[in-house]
Amino acid sequence: MMKNILINEIKKSNGIEDLSVEDLDDLFDIEAFRF
């Protein structure tokens, strides 16, 4: 649940709504360090 919320925040902040969840999974570990 928390991961989905974080993914949604990443999508909004970076304007990458067109990426799939699978694409974002690759970015998640790196992006998570910002929060």
Image (cartoon, rainbow, N blue to C red):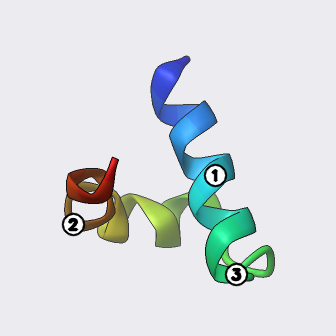
User: Separation of disc 2 and disc 3 at Cα?
Assistant: 15 Å
Residue under circle 3?
16
Residue 9 is tagged as: 1
Q: What kind of residue is marked 1? A: Glu
State the residue at coordinates (32%, 69%): 26
Residue under circle 2?
30
- Taking the view exactly as shown, the residue that stands out farthest to the top is 1
State which tag comes first along the sequence, 2 or 3: 3
Horizontally, is 2 left or right of 19 in the view?
A: left
State which tag comes first along the sequence, 3 or 1: 1
Horizontally, is 32 left or right of 4 in the view?
A: left
User: Separation of disc 2 and disc 1 at Cα?
Assistant: 14 Å
**Looking at the rendering, which quadrant does residue 31 occupy?**
bottom left
State which tag comes first along the sequence, 2 or 1: 1
Dot 1: within a 10 Å radius of its alpha carbon, few (fewer than 14), some, or many (20 or more) residues? few
Q: What kind of residue is marked 3? A: Ile
Residue 23 is tagged as: none
Tell me the element at label 3. loop
Residue 5 in the image, given as x and y percentages of width and height: 62, 33
Rendered view: 5 above or below 18 = above
